[in-house]
Amino acid sequence: MSKDQAMLGITEFAPVHHKPNRKDTKIRVKKAPVPTDFMENGACKEGPVEIFFSDKPHEISTAKTKCGICEVTEECLTFAIQNNEEGIWGGTTERERRIIKRRLYYKKTGA
Ligand code: SF4
């Protein structure tokens, strides 16, 4: 703080050239916790987990088959969409979920 500032009663110094960046102005909203109880009843609970994050077509197919017999597919899919999850969730790939999200957006906005 300069002598002039002290005389004028300015106690806090803020450089004139300072422009708030995105981090300064970003409003942080805490998301409500998404329930994950459904995972306890997932058909994938016993593994193998790797097939749900694989690029190999036969493993993706096996993972989707597990999802097909799973009793929490709907909750799982909702969770994955809300959290932008990677891999197979709710019987869908990331790409398929992007399409679902886009459709939901268009349906919501009427576009
Ligand atoms: S839907 Fe698929 S990924 Fe989700 S809990 Fe069931 S088996 Fe696991």
Image (cartoon, helix red, strand yellow):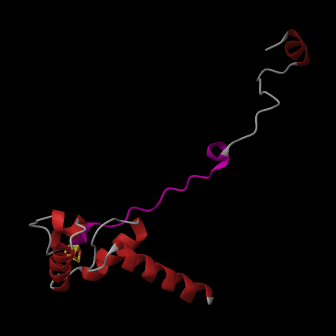
Q: Position of residue 105 (x, y in %)?
A: 54, 81
Q: For residue 73: magenta?
A: no
Q: Where ligand 1 lies, by image quadrant?
A: bottom left
Q: Does residue 90 appear left or right of residue 33 in this picture? A: left
Farthest top residue? 3
Residue at horizontal 23%, vertical 79%? 72
- Image quarter in which the N terminus is found: top right
Q: Quadrant of residue 96?
A: bottom left
Q: Tell me: residue 83, above or below residue 100.
A: above
Q: Position of residue 74 (x, y in %)?
A: 30, 82
What is the magenta segment's predominant secondary structure?
A: loop
Residue at horizontal 77%, vertical 23%? 13
- Image quarter in which the C terminus is found: bottom right
Residue at horizontal 44%, vertical 62%? 32
| Of 44 and 59, the residue lying toward us | 59
Q: Does residue 7 appear left or right of residue 18 in this picture? A: right
How many numbered marks are there?
0
| Of 108 and 99, the residue lying toward us | 99
Q: Tell me: residue 97, above or below residue 5.
A: below
Q: Position of residue 45 (x, y in %)?
A: 13, 68
Q: Tell me: residue 40, above or below residue 101.
A: above
Q: Tell me: residue 75, above or below residue 84.
A: below
| Of 40 and 107, the residue lying toward us | 107
Q: Does residue 21 appear left or right of residue 16 in this picture? A: left
Q: For residue 37: magenta?
A: yes
Q: Quadrant of residue 107?
A: bottom right
Magenta stretch, residue numbers: 22-38
